[in-house]
Amino acid sequence: MKFFQNQIKLKPFSRGFYLITNEVLEAIPELKQINIGQLQVFIKHTSASLTINENADYTVREDFESHFNKFVPENAPYYKHNFEGSDDMPAHIKASLIGASIQIPITNGKLNLGIWQGIYLCEHRDYGGSRQLVITAFGI
Amino acid sequence: MKFFQNQIKLKPFSRGFYLITNEVLEAIPELKQINIGQLQVFIKHTSASLTINENADYTVREDFESHFNKFVPENAPYYKHNFEGSDDMPAHIKASLIGASIQIPITNGKLNLGIWQGIYLCEHRDYGGSRQLVITAFGI
Amino acid sequence: MKFFQNQIKLKPFSRGFYLITNEVLEAIPELKQINIGQLQVFIKHTSASLTINENADYTVREDFESHFNKFVPENAPYYKHNFEGSDDMPAHIKASLIGASIQIPITNGKLNLGIWQGIYLCEHRDYGGSRQLVITAFGI
């Protein structure tokens, strides 16, 4: 049984959805020692999130941003938590809709993703700053 | 420590929500060798997803389809990614709202689900074809 | 390799979002024996869910309740599954939007959460009763 864990800080991203598959893979080179296992990527924040989606066409990521802005609006009349800016409460809600972690199977030393799948950082704040990830790989 | 991993292709489903608990269990008979552990089911696609929900009344699954179609509409004026059909971009968004994997605890050789819980395949494309799952069980 | 699993029943909560980080930690004292690992918290129900979000200001949790009530409405004209009460079908949808489990990295015998992160029980029924959690910690 092998267990590896590394922590990284991403560079700051502006609000939007971004492919970070390469950043994650570079942060956990020990992955190739695992034949069968699981990778977890966890984000230590409540106004940004992680998901897996289409890795090719950047308009998919732009449409994600448009949709989430429409369906989790700023300045909704029912928000009470608004002293940190109009982008703050929507960011918390988006973060829980999408989730703080992803789990991906490892097979023969590689992530067993579909060919169109990539890892997205979902930055929901206008100026969220540098986000920390805990990356854990385990298996046999 | 035990680690088992199998990959299956589901038969094609039309757009909608479907119970696949039995298909998953049949694909990982090694589960019964695990006393304490975790099962992960991962879908290798970005326009279909997996969730856990009510396993009895099929109208729950029909209402899921109705709700998601209303709240992640086709042909939204803000979509740019529309060259793969009007069902494509909504499928990507639904997939990230629901998620690409589920993790279920294993106890005494069985999934430790509540009595009303089942595993759903959520097919968001009209003709999504046969979907691949990576099923991993591990524990002691 | 260590694997620990405990099951608890929470006290009944009324509809809303609640911090349960302490209840979870008290239920799995073996966590401190793990240097690198993962904690899973799984809810055995289809009308309540678990997420990770802001642990300080209670108005965040109130705004979650307001938002989810607006965006997953009761008595939607397209619901067929309504014989268990008007709060039932929205509860199923909310549960799958948020999810039945959370996975958190363990580092040096502690949950490796961000300083603002806490575990939420999301109770989507008016009278959901006592909810069961399966809490599993594993690692080296």
Image (spheres, coloured by chain):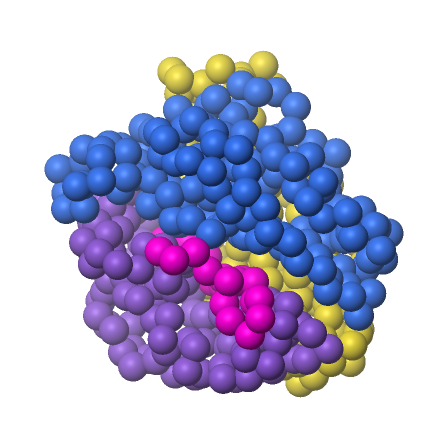
Chain colours: A blue, B yellow, C purple
Q: Is residue C85 visible?
A: no
In the image, is residue B87 part of the stretch drawn in magenta? Answer: no
User: Measured along the vertical axis of the image, is residue A116 above or below residue C79?
Assistant: above
Location of residue A139 (image quadrant): bottom right
Q: In the drawing, does residue C100 fall left or right of residue A91?
A: right
Q: Can residue A90 be seen in this snapshot?
A: yes
When the figure is inspected, residue A108 is found, relative to residue B25, above or below; the finding is above
**Relative side of B78 to C82, left or right:** right
Where does the image place residue B109, in percent across and percent down from the top left?
Answer: 70, 81
Question: In front: B61, or A7?
Answer: A7
- Is residue C101 part of the magenta span, yes or no? yes
- The mark tally for this picture is 0
Q: Residue at horizontal 55%, vertical 48%? A: A133
- Residue A77 position by quadrant: top left
Residue range (magenta): C92-117
Q: Residue at x 35, y 66 (%)?
A: C121
- C139 or B97, which lies in front? C139
Residue B91: image location, x then y, percent: 53, 33
Q: Which residue lies at the image location 82% right of the left edge and 65% below the top edge?
A: A140
* Front residue of this view, candidates B117 and B33: B33
Q: Nearer the viewer, residue B35 or B21?
A: B35
x and y percent of residue A28 in the render? 72, 48
Q: Estimate the x, y position of residue B140 in percent, counting from the top left.
A: 73, 80
Residue in the picture at 78% in, 77% down: B1
Quadrant showing the N terminus of chain A:
bottom right
Q: Is residue B79 left or right of residue B104?
A: left
Residue C61 vertical position relative to residue B114 in the rendered view, above or below: above
